Image: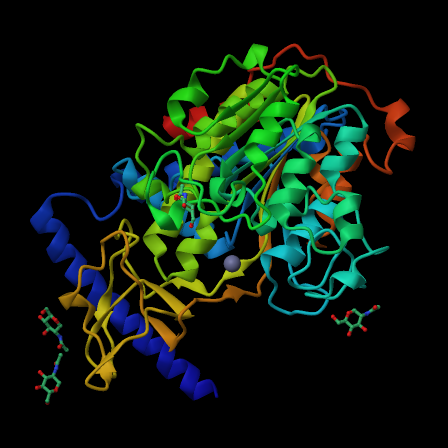
Amino acid sequence: MQQGFGRRWFEVRTMKVITLLLTCLVCRGSGKPQFPEQEKDPGFWNAWAQRTLRSALTLQEPNRNIAKNLILFLGDGMGVPTVTAARILKGQLSGQYGEEVQLEMDKFPYVSLSKTYNTNAQVPDSAGTATAYLCGVKANEGTVGVSAAAVRGQCNTTRGNEVTSILKWAKESGKSVGIVTTTRVNHATPSAAYMPPEAVQAGCKDIARQLMENIPDINVIMGGGRKYMLPKNTSDVEYPGEKKHSGTRKDGRNLIQEWTDRMRDKKGYYVWNKKDLLSINPSSADYLLGLFEPGDLQYDLERDSSTDPSLTEMVEVAIKILRKNPEGFYLLVEGGRIDHGHHEGKAKQALHEAVEMDRAIGRAGLLTSVHDTMTVVTADHSHVFNFGGYTLRGNSIFGLAPMVSDVDQKPFTSILYGNGPGFKLINGSRVNVSTEDYQQNDYQAQSAVPLRMETHGGEDVAVFSKGPMAHLLHGVQEQNYIPHAMAYAACIGQNRAHCRTRSSATPLAITTPSLFLLITAAWLLC
Ligand SMILES: *[C@@H]1O[C@H](CO)[C@@H](O)[C@H](O)[C@H]1NC(C)=O
Ligand SMILES: *[C@@H]1O[C@H](CO)[C@@H](O)[C@H](O)[C@H]1NC(C)=O
Ligand SMILES: *[C@@H]1O[C@H](CO)[C@@H](O)[C@H](O)[C@H]1NC(C)=O
Ligand SMILES: *[C@@H]1O[C@H](CO)[C@@H](O)[C@H](O)[C@H]1NC(C)=O
Ligand SMILES: [Zn+2]
């Protein structure tokens, strides 16, 4: 044992020395230092750590205000390796090495780990986990809005087992509620939020209909999914004549028309493109339905920015509409296609989705105040995505490891999947990635096991929080604890007894970011 470990350690060391020698040759050639010059100075690291320490010491007095507003950013499939890789990508997109930059979520003062398993699954799916972080109850995989007593695919078992979501608790307390997603709006994550009792009684009403019939209660809903709202073979407004984009409803109902009819005297607007979205005056809109694609929205890398809004633009409009309510709001924002990118083995698509969600987190921070708004960022589950291979500082996150396999002598990308569609053999051996364009948007990173769809991962995911009572999200917790902590912070749902002794924040500084964020940002920019 000892000897084997020693030898391996020696080999790793030797390899690092060779790598460093190579690097020096490379950096001498290119003129760019292999890492920032200032990092050679211990004073640089000591000063940075001391600034971080001083700002950590300000947290000794937690924010005990009542949260008027609650925002949950849910990165579907955004495990910790995805967060780290997205951070490096964000830095590299702005010309930096990448590792040293801060994501917007990195600036949140509290972080906890969430255990994501479903009641009947070690590695969870998005439906069961949505029930946990929206309804506060762990559930079986494939079920939304019902407890673990309900069985997937058996609608007759849902009755009596339905659980309510934090959106409902917020609504019952007079708050406005909104859902913004990059997927079709009837996808698993948002759907746990709008399960009306009739739907449960009827057994199996489709999610699109549940959503639209419940929509007078949801002030803002944005995402994709037009075709699920329109009668079968109705031509799509954006892609007329394209069969695959036309309506899918067998019951012949036009749910968009039904919604606009109900909104006639209610300041409600339906939009399907970016121009119409941005022309809405948020101060005169109380309800908004935005459906920007027939199905899921485009990947952000592929988005036509002249016709389709970004997640950040959608979030900005949503907050401006919702924050008019003096009782506050609950907003669920889903970066839903991080998951899709990973399932397809397309790490570049997934990571750009995560970077865009992070931009939306920053925008939301500018439009709200930590004095009265609790913001939580988390994921429903992880993926079997990772990156490694002793890559050097500043190596392109989509680049190669600085070595070849000592078995097949071929290079490999730093990013690899445990399973998925990137598994390929040519004449019985692993593809030489140097013969492929591994930097392109749709490149599928190699995987150990061939699968048409890469799978979710089972490890814990991070929960970042800021604002009133954000410190409740600490330590290693069950995922279903999240809405309990958020509801407590906002004095909604079952948590009200403590509210008399806590005070609402003075809504003074609605656009002032916290001192913590200001200081951290200023220091990092210097
Ligand atoms: C529900 O329906 C399934 C068939 O779909 C049946 O096997 C089961 O016994 C039913 N359960 C109840 C509680 O009625
Ligand atoms: C829908 O289908 C009917 C009959 O199949 C056809 O007559 C009609 O033109 C179709 N409408 C559209 C919009 O494609
Ligand atoms: C892999 O491909 C690169 C580029 O074509 C080539 O230089 C290298 O020799 C190849 N390695 C192996 C082991 O085939
Ligand atoms: C696979 O092997 C065959 C026979 O050895 C050879 O003709 C062919 O070019 C090889 N294909 C590739 C992609 O290397
Ligand atoms: Zn998934």
- Figure check: 506 above or below 397: above
Residue 41 shows up from this direction: no
Count the numbered circles shown. Answer: 0
Residue 395 shows up from this direction: yes
Hey, which quadrant is residue 179 in on the image?
A: top right
Residue that appears at 47% across and 32% down: 360
Indicate the colouring scheme: rainbow
Q: Quadrant of the C terminus?
A: top left
Q: Residue furthest right?
A: 497
Q: Residue furthest left?
A: 29
Residue that appears at 72% across and 36% down: 167
The image position of residue 160, as x and y in percent, is 86, 55
Left or right: residue 480 compared with residue 409 = right
Residue that appears at 30% across and 42% down: 302
Decide which of 98, 497 is in the foreground and name it: 497
Hey, which quadrant is residue 285 in on the image?
A: top right
- Figure check: 403 above or below 138: below
Decide which of 238, 523 is in the foreground and name it: 238
The image position of residue 237, as x and y in percent, is 39, 34
The image position of residue 322, as x and y in percent, is 62, 21
Hey, which quadrant is residue 170 in on the image?
A: top right
Left or right: residue 94 compared with residue 28 = right
The image position of residue 200, as x and y in percent, is 77, 51
Decide which of 386, 241 is in the foreground and name it: 241
Left or right: residue 410 compared with residue 470 = left
Ligand 4 lies in quarter: bottom left
